[in-house]
Image (cartoon, rainbow, N blue to C red):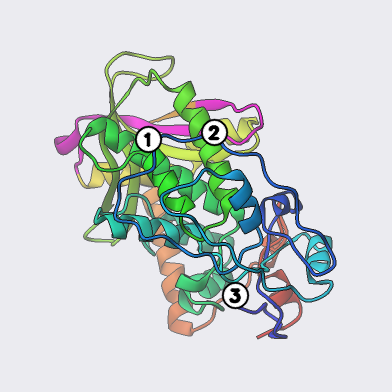
Amino acid sequence: MTNGSGNGQRGIIRVPIGAVSAMNQRSTKSAPPPASPAPPTPPAPPELPLKPTEIEGGASTDQRAASTPPVGQPVAVGATPPAPVGYVESCLAQGLIPMTDPSIVSIDKAIETVFEQAGVPRLGGASGDLGWSSFSVYQRCPYLYYRTYINPFVPKDEQIKSPALEIGSLVHVLLAVRYEHMRDPTYPFTPEKIYNALLATRANAEVLMESWRLYQGYDIRWEADYLIPIVAEYHTVDPETRQSCRYDLIAKVTEAQPGIMPGTWCVEHKTLGRFDDTGLNGWRNDGEIIGQLMLWKRLKLDKKFGKLQGVLVNIIGKQKNQQFHRTPVPVELWKHKEHAKDLKVWRGLRLLCESMDTWPRARANCVGRYQCGLFEHCADRET
């Protein structure tokens, strides 16, 4: 993978500098980072048909061997391919993540492997190219949409997520398994088994451990959970518009909670670093949340799961001293009608771009809270 300039350097991803510490950072000039503290020892290893995995390289493999409990067979640790001199330092200076170890497997691929080897359908994952994420990307910038979904620089199966996104993906899977096992005690996976199985893969060990820390905090906080799971990871598609949606959890509440009435709720899991007013209460005007409510009504899911009270945004804090919050978003039909009209216009604009084979750049959105990952490409006329 190369960057947009095509100069043969290793792939880089632009993310906030604070996220860099969670990655594998090595160069021929610098010593390896100190071993991360060991995560709490999970229960016994899973009895799954998993084969021992040899790690051919990895910037955090030394940390993994020193800090993680043995799982099944021993894990072989090999040498790390050296990064170009000054490469890591250059990345850090620009606030980029140095991808110094091509042997590390993405969290998504590791998760797929664990489920496939156990012969169990995967829980978690994207809802499809017509979910809210695609609309959100197009609204931010048509050219970014083009380079994400139509003509990406790197094929989708080779794209590398930032650590924050990988952590969010894994936390979603752990929560899905938690609630599915609550619903059906015979379900073959538990969060502990998933975590142990992933430790035997070449996934980033620090991402695994941070995800496990967040999950364990959640499990302790909601040990006496009032959410009674009906189904975890329910995927649905509108047959007319092809708009897709994956409900993280559909659950029943039997006893009223503050701001939460008894009945059926869609539960949307979110990991969040800052618990400010926007992060906790901005979901009332979020397109993904409104779309879930709108699609529920359009597909008449009340008949299958009961009358919907709304979406419960289940927020898992990333703080060292973790915080948790659940924000209820009620059903408001007037908002659904407006959102449906808005999406028709956005679909029309997208079709216009396709027909003209022209995808304009929304330069007003190049720099916001974070700089767009295509900034250098667009600013330097790179192809």
**Image x and y of residue 168, in percent:** 51, 47
Report the amino acid beneath label 3.
Pro
Rounded to the nearest whole Å, what is the CA distance between mark 1 and mark 3?
36 Å
Secondary structure of the residue carrying tag 3 is loop
Packing grade of label 3 (10 A; few <14, some 14-19, many >=20) is few
Q: Percent from the top left, x then y, of residue 73?
A: 43, 54
> Which quadrant of the rendered structure holds the C terminus?
bottom right
The residue under label 3 is 360
- Tell me the amino acid under the disc marked 2: Pro
- Whole-percent x, y for residue 25 in the image: 73, 60
Q: Report the span colored magenta.
A: 300-325
Residue designated by label 1: 267
Q: Which mark is residue 40?
A: 2
Residue 164 part of the magenta segment: no
Tell me the element at label 1. Answer: strand
The one of 5 and 123 positioned closer to us in this rendering = 123
Question: Do tag 2 and tag 1 residues touch (Cβ < 8 Å)?
Answer: no
Q: Spatial distance from mark 2 to mark 1, Cα to Cα?
A: 27 Å
